[in-house]
Image (cartoon, helix red, strand yellow):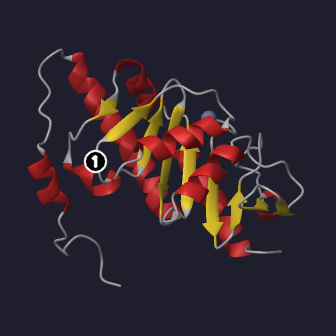
Amino acid sequence: MLYEKERNALIKTARAMESYGLVRMSGGNVSLRIDDLVLVTPTAMSYDTMTAEDIVITDLKGERVEGKRRPTSDLKAILYIFNHMPDVKAIIHTHQPKAVALSLVADKLPLISTTLIDEVKDEVMVAPFTISSDEGMGIETVKYAGKALCVILKNHGIMAYGKSLDQALCAAVYLEESCDVYLHALSTGRQIAVLTREQADAEDAPRGYYGQPE
Ligand SMILES: [Zn+2]
């Protein structure tokens, strides 16, 4: 079996996605690019009982390389992102409720907190609605990504991506927390204190303290 360790990492990430409340049941998907191959979670299967054999491996055109299951129905969108954002190695798609709620009332999540800047890297745009399981989700993600590690898909969910599964998961989790904060602030009807670009750049500058030494 190709990439057994990575297959298990995909499942672990999918279960974490569910435990953080970013998806319910078999919603969303996780994918990982390794050179010219893509590992993806199968469609409509519970993450609880998923095993390494259930992960599907395709090439960058979507041709099956290994695995018997049907891949996620969002495969075309995922491949579009991998093919157009070469630095992206991992993608997580979720239906996280706070981000979807925000997409109903705003065009973006502005620079509202240090957490957002540290973990998601920039304000997050709300991309226009496209139907699910369609390449359009990927096209709009690439168009609206900017410097951020997430794009919110209007009336649908989010795409989070990064150089690793951990980075994509982290971005999705902290995007949800940031959307929660922003929605609470919006609900007061009072003016929102958004960070300036200068403040955001200062927060984003490398300072070499956070994190444990290797
Ligand atoms: Zn979806």
Query: In the image shown, does 68 or 124 lie closer to the viewer?
Result: 124
Q: Position of residue 70 (x, y in %)?
A: 84, 48
**Where's the N terminus, which quadrant?**
bottom right
Q: Mark yes or no: residue 21 visible.
A: no
Query: In the image shown, does 19 or 100 lie closer to the viewer?
Result: 100
Q: Position of residue 89 (x, y in %)?
A: 55, 64
Using residue 198 as the reference point, say whether residue 30 is left or right of it.
right
Q: Which residue has dot 1 on it?
A: 116
Using residue 63 as the reference point, say whether residue 34 is left or right of it.
left
Q: Mark yes or no: residue 94 visible.
A: yes
Q: Give the image quarter of residue 11.
A: bottom right
Rendered-image quarter of ligand 1: top right
Q: Find the residue positioned furthest to the bottom.
A: 214
- Tell me which residue sits at (78%, 49%) in the image: 71
Query: In the image shown, does 20 or 53 lie closer to the viewer?
Result: 53
Using residue 178 as the reference point, say whether residue 173 is left or right of it.
right
- Tell me which residue sits at (40%, 52%) in the image: 149
User: How many numbered discs sit on the rendered protein?
Assistant: 1
The residue carrying mark 1 has its beta carbon less than 8 Å from ligand 1: no
Dot 1 lies on which element? helix
Q: Position of residue 127 (x, y in %)?
A: 45, 32
Amino acid type, mark 1:
Leu
